[in-house]
Image (cartoon, rainbow, N blue to C red):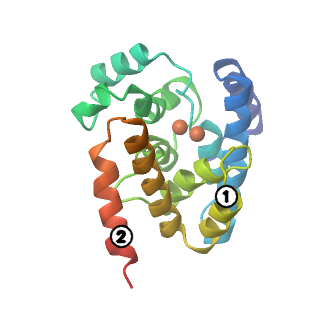
Amino acid sequence: MNITKKEMQALNQHLQQILTPKRYQHSLGVAQTAKELAIHYGCDENQAYLAGLVHDYAKNMKKSELIAIAERENLMTDPIEKELPEVLHAVVGAWLLPRETPVRDPDILQAVARHTLGDLHMSLLDKILFVADIIEPNRQTPHLEEERNMAFQNLDQAILRSLESTIRYCLEIGRLLHPRSILLRNDYIRKLKP
Ligand SMILES: [Fe+2]
Ligand SMILES: [Fe+2]
C-alpha cells in the first residue's frame, strides 16, 4: 500500500517535529540506504524507503512512556525489556504508526517492530531495514565502508556481524544482554555454515 505525495510531505514534517534533527537525518540516511539495498536484492524500493524513514518513530519518547505503552498494549516479548526500555522504541513505533500516520502497511510495521532486536524469521524487508540502520552514511562507526560492502554482498553475514558487535558492546559496558541477540546469533551462525 502506497501513501500519497501529500501524505509523504505531512509525514516528513511530523517526523521533524517529533525527532531531533540528528535523528531525522539518520532516518533519511536509513531510508536511502534501505532503498539501495532493496534495489540490489529485489525488494520493493518504496516500501523499503518508507520503512527506513519511519523506523525510529518512537525513538525520542521517554523511557517511562515506552514502558507504559508496551505494558498496556502487551508489546513486550521478554520481561528483560522492562530493564532495557530503549529497545522498546521499535515495537512501540510499529504500534503508534498506523494510529498516528498513514503508514499502515503490515510489512513495513513488522520491519519497524523488528529493526532493533531482529527476529528468528525475518523477511527480506526486515533484514534490509535491520542492516540499513547500521550502515547508513551518517553513522560514525570505524568500519562503515567495510560493513557497507558486506551488506551488499551478503545480507545475512552483515546481520551476524552486527549481532556480534552488539553482544561485544554489551559485554564491554556491562549492560544486560537481550536473550534474542544470542538466539539470533546462533541461528545465523548455523545458517551461514558452509
Ligand atoms: Fe532504532
Ligand atoms: Fe535507527
Q: Position of residue 67 (x, y in %)?
A: 35, 20
Q: Which mark is residue 98?
A: none
Pointer 1 residue? 45
Q: Residues within 10 Å of mark 2 (few under 14, many from 20)?
A: few
Residue 86, picture quadrant = top left
Q: Position of residue 178 (x, y in %)?
A: 31, 42
Vertical relation: 100 (above or below) 148: above
Residue that sits furthest to the left in the current view: 79
Q: Which mark is residue 189?
A: 2
Image check: 43 left or right of 5? left
Which quadrant of the render holds ligand 2?
top right
Residue at (68% x, 66% y) in the render: 39
Q: Is mark 1 within 8 Å of ligand 2?
A: no
Residue 60, picture quadrant = top right
Q: Residues within 10 Å of mark 1 (few under 14, many from 20)?
A: many
- Callout 2 amino acid: Ile
User: Element at badge 1?
Assistant: helix
Can you tell which of label 2 and label 1 is closer to the viewer? 2
> Of 149 and 10, which appears nearest the observer?
149
Q: How far apart, in angstroms, are the residues tagged by discs 2 and 1?
A: 28 Å
Residue at (24% x, 37% y) in the render: 78
Residue at (35% x, 60% y) in the render: 185
User: Element at badge 2?
Assistant: helix
